[in-house]
Amino acid sequence: MSPDKDVMVVKSVGKPLVLTKLTTPSIRSSIASAKTVKRRVQYLAKVRRYVSGCDTTAQLSQEIRSSTVEERSRILDELTSQSGCKVSVSTEESLAMKANLIIPWNKIRVMRRYMIVH
């Protein structure tokens, strides 16, 4: 038996089965309180840990890669607008990056295109 009240580990012939309680929310996360959203994030992190075999970083990066480009850009826009974060790379810094990383200029232009905040 697992020490977690939401997760139950059951012995089987092969690998043990992990059963988890999944509740259907009555309110969307976009309008829920901060406490409710935080609790949901913690629950999803716990499920991700069980599903990934404790390699949560690889699992989360794969989840992000599997989302659509529009969804990723929308999330990035929300994060940058909330934090007020802006990335600016000066000409000198881009020249240093090119020299240190041995990146051709066309790749630098592609990178700079994605770093511009509108």
Image: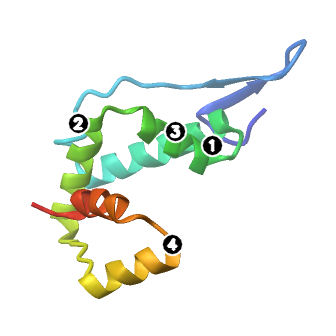
To which quarter of the image does residue 5 belong?
top right
SS at badge 4? helix
> What residue is shown at x 51% (from left), y 72% (from top)?
101
To which quarter of the image does residue 115 belong?
bottom left
Between marks 1 and 3 in the image, the one whose residue lies nearer the viewer: 3
The numbered disc on residue 101 is 4
Q: Which residue is mark 2?
A: 70
Chain-order first, disc 3 or disc 2? 3
SS at badge 3? helix
Amino acid type shown at disc 4: Leu
Amino acid type shown at disc 3: Gln
Real-space Cα distance between discs 2 and 1? 27 Å
Chain-order first, disc 4 or disc 1? 1
Circle 2 crowding by C-alpha within 10 Å: few under 14, some 14–19, many from 20: few
Amino acid type shown at disc 1: Arg
Q: Which residue is mark 1?
A: 49
Chain-order first, disc 1 or disc 3? 1
Q: Which residue is mark 3?
A: 62
Q: Position of residue 22 (x, y in %)?
A: 48, 25
The numbered disc on residue 60 is none
Q: Position of residue 6 (x, y in %)?
A: 58, 34
Would residue 79 be found to the left or right of residue 117 on screen? right
Circle 3 crowding by C-alpha within 10 Å: few under 14, some 14–19, many from 20: few
Query: Do the residues bearing badges 4 and 1 touch, measured as CB atoms within 8 Å?
Result: no
Real-space Cα distance between discs 1 and 3? 14 Å
Chain-order first, disc 4 or disc 3? 3
Query: Do the residues bearing badges 1 and 3 touch, measured as CB atoms within 8 Å?
Result: no
Chain-order first, disc 4 or disc 2? 2
Would residue 2 be found to the left or right of residue 28 on screen? right
Work out which residue is located at the far right of the displayed protein and give it. 13
